[in-house]
Structures are given as structure tokens and as C-alpha cells.
Image (cartoon, grey):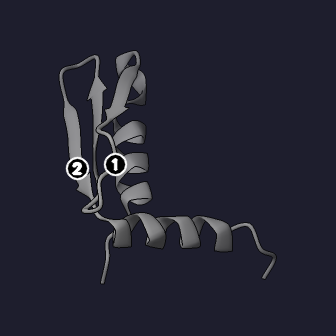
Amino acid sequence: MLTSVYAEVEEFVLRHHSCGGYTYGSTEPIQAGYGLTLSCRCGSNYNRWITPSEAEYDLLWSRLLGFDN
């Protein structure tokens, strides 16, 4: 089962929201995916390679969350 990159990013941001901010960036996408980096002011970092399958999973999941049950 794929992990949700969105959930991991959300967890990082929530864990570090009181640190005073963060910066983010990504590499240029290539066929194999792209790199994502979040850097908190406290010095903690989140680095993740995101495959096309993971990006597609998160996109689908985020769109499904918008539908009424």
C-alpha cells in the first residue's frame, strides 16, 4: 500500500507549526518522479522522493475528499 505524501507533509507541518515557519522546494519533475523538501526554522527537514504513483494516489485521494458521502 502506498503511503500518503500529503499525510506525511501535513504531519511535519503540524508538528513544527509553532517553530516560526518553514520553507519548501522541489526538484524539476522527471519521469521517475521528483524530490520534495520542507525545512523548518528549528533545523528539522523533511526530504522525500515522490514517485508518479504516489503523486497520482495523493491527487485522487484529495479529489475524493471533496465529494459528499
Q: Amino acid at mark 2?
A: Arg
At horizontal 23% and vertical 40% (from top left) the residue drawn is 46
Along the line of sight, the residue nearer the viewer: 30 or 34: 30
Residue 5 relative to residue 44: left or right: right
Q: Amino acid at mark 1?
A: Pro
Q: Secondary structure at mark 2?
A: strand
Q: Find residue 32 and report its horizontal and vertical position in percent.
A: 24, 62
Q: Is residue 5 above or below residue 42?
A: below
In the picture of the structure, the residue carrying the numbered disc 2 is 48
Q: Quadrant of the N terminus?
A: bottom left
If you read the primary sequence from the N terminus, does the residue marked by circle 1 or circle 2 appear first? 1
Q: Find residue 34 and report its horizontal and vertical position in percent.
A: 29, 50
Q: Find residue 2 and report its horizontal and vertical position in percent.
A: 32, 77
At horizontal 48% and vertical 66% (from top left) the residue drawn is 58
Location of residue 24 (image quadrant): top left
In the picture of the structure, the residue carrying the numbered disc 1 is 29
How far apart marks 1 and 2 lie (CA) works out to: 13 Å
Q: Is residue 23 above or below residue 60?
A: above
Q: Secondary structure at mark 1?
A: loop
Location of residue 20 (image quadrant): top left
Q: Quadrant of the C terminus?
A: bottom right
Q: Find residue 9 and report its horizontal and vertical position in percent.
A: 38, 48
User: How many numbered marks appear?
Assistant: 2
Q: Which mark is residue 11?
A: none
Which residue of the protein is positioned furthest toward the right in this rendering?
68
Along the line of sight, the residue nearer the viewer: 49 or 5: 49
Which residue of the protein is positioned furthest toward the front in this rendering?
31
| Category of crowding for the residue at label 1, using alpha-carbon neighbours closer than 10 angstroms: few (below 14), some (14–19), many (at least 20) | few
Location of residue 61 (image quadrant): bottom right
At horizontal 29% and vertical 64% (from top left) the residue drawn is 51
